[in-house]
Amino acid sequence: MYYLDKNTVLTIERIEKYIEDFKFRYQPRLLKNKRYFDCKNDTIMNRTFKDITKPNSKIATPWSEYICTLISGYFAGKPVTYDTQSEELKNILSSYTVKEVSHNQSLAKDCSIYGVAAELLFINGDKQVQFEKIEPSTVIPIYSTDITKELIYCIRFWDSTDILTNETTTNIEVYDSRQITYYSKSINGTVCTGKESHYFKEVPINIYYNNEDLTGDAEKVHTLIDGYDLSLSDTANFREELNDSYLCFRNTNLDEEAIIAMKQNRIICIEDTEQGMQSDVHWLNKDSNDTENENYKNRLASDIKMFSCISELENKSHTTATAAKLSMLALEQKCATKETYFRKALLNRWEMVCNYHNLLGSNITIEDLKITFLRNIPLDLVSIGDFVAKMAPYISKRSLLSQIPFISDIDGELSAMEKENSINSYDDDILSGSDEDGQ
């Protein structure tokens, strides 16, 4: 993270220095996380031997993709739900329902891979607020030195190469709470190419953090993954060397032509060369301990799963969803941290959306906006129903309905319940013979 005093002007020199420092300190780690997710694991892919004739299998395993897919799917595989008393805010939220599901899942995936994710808010041609995910390895957030650590600047940069001249230009966008400033950097230096105002009253790049350390879910087990790759590749190398075993002839006077002839005819015929010296033919092989090798690889696989907190996701011995959730305490703690930072970023997104609508004459706030995250596991509806029934005398219907995962529209459900109750009440009156005057 970078921090800067609010009163400090972000000059071109500072922008260039931030990009240079970011490329040196932070971008390599982010790109490494992405390479491991893409199964281009550094250690095994870059391994070389001094003996160039030695087999050098490079088996990279997609452990990182497996870990990130499981955890991000468990955390964000089901859409978040919103609840608010503001009808206008409800309408705004519902207008993004279709887009937001895949968008949030993509952000959660980036958080899992990189340890951080980012989205850009902008106004489209229809004058509606839109948001798109942007590459985290090209975004530099800069916070104030105040205790609140407010996001005061965000630098976004990327390179583009002219296909005709082969010249590379670095495109730079600097966002603050009022405007976007565009720069272009080439061999001739960095120049400002334009400015544009925005209407969000905040930096319109929204940052999502995976945890306090900004680490990816598989990042801390990279060395274990390297060990697994090396072990698997060494086993493949050993098998290949077995295929190239040496055939030894002892006490024979065979010339090269005779050996070639025997190889072609698939027949070995030799005689003792001298009395008392017995001839022999045998293969020269390496000794192999397959059991030890397999145990080592299994131990590495077990450690990868345990330290990345995914081992219990594969446990098939649980009989209920509640038992499964209780057993996944480590993963739940990881997701609780994810949820804290993700909720904060979502609230910031909707606050910026409200800021834009308020400029158009609305008066919307997110003060009562409630966000609920649902884990992507089989639901134990019996347990949920039992909980709702027991708490009904003590908790409002709205709060109870928010605990039922398959109910996304709480107000619609309350309206349907009220309508059903009125119909049932009318039917009871008819059956009892009462009229509207109670006679």
Image: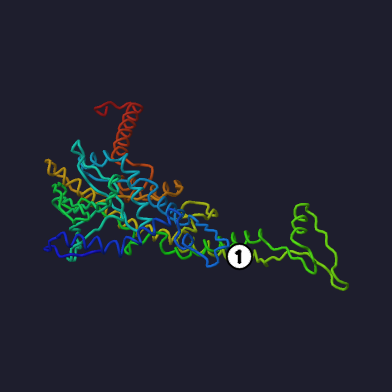
Residue 15 drawn at (x, y percent): 19, 60
Q: Which residue is mark 1?
A: 293
Does residue 102 appear to the left or right of 293 in the view shown? left
Residue positioned most to the right: 275
Residue lying at 12% horizontally and 44% vertically, measured from the top left: 359
* Quadrant containing the N terminus in the rendered view: bottom left
Q: Please tell me which residue lies in front, 114 or 194.
A: 194
Quarter holding residue 341: bottom left
Does residue 365 appear to the left or right of 73 in the view shown? left
Quarter holding residue 16: bottom left
Looking at the picture, which amino acid does disc 1 mark? Answer: Asn
317 shown above or below 398:
below
* Quadrant containing the C terminus in the rendered view: top left
- What crowding class fits label 1: few (fewer than 14 Cα within 10 Å), some (14-19), or many (20 or more)? some
Q: Secondary structure at mark 1?
A: helix
Let me know if residue 323 appears in the view.
no
Residue lying at 38% horizontally and 42% vertically, measured from the top left: 406
Q: Please tell me which residue lies in front, 69 or 343.
A: 69
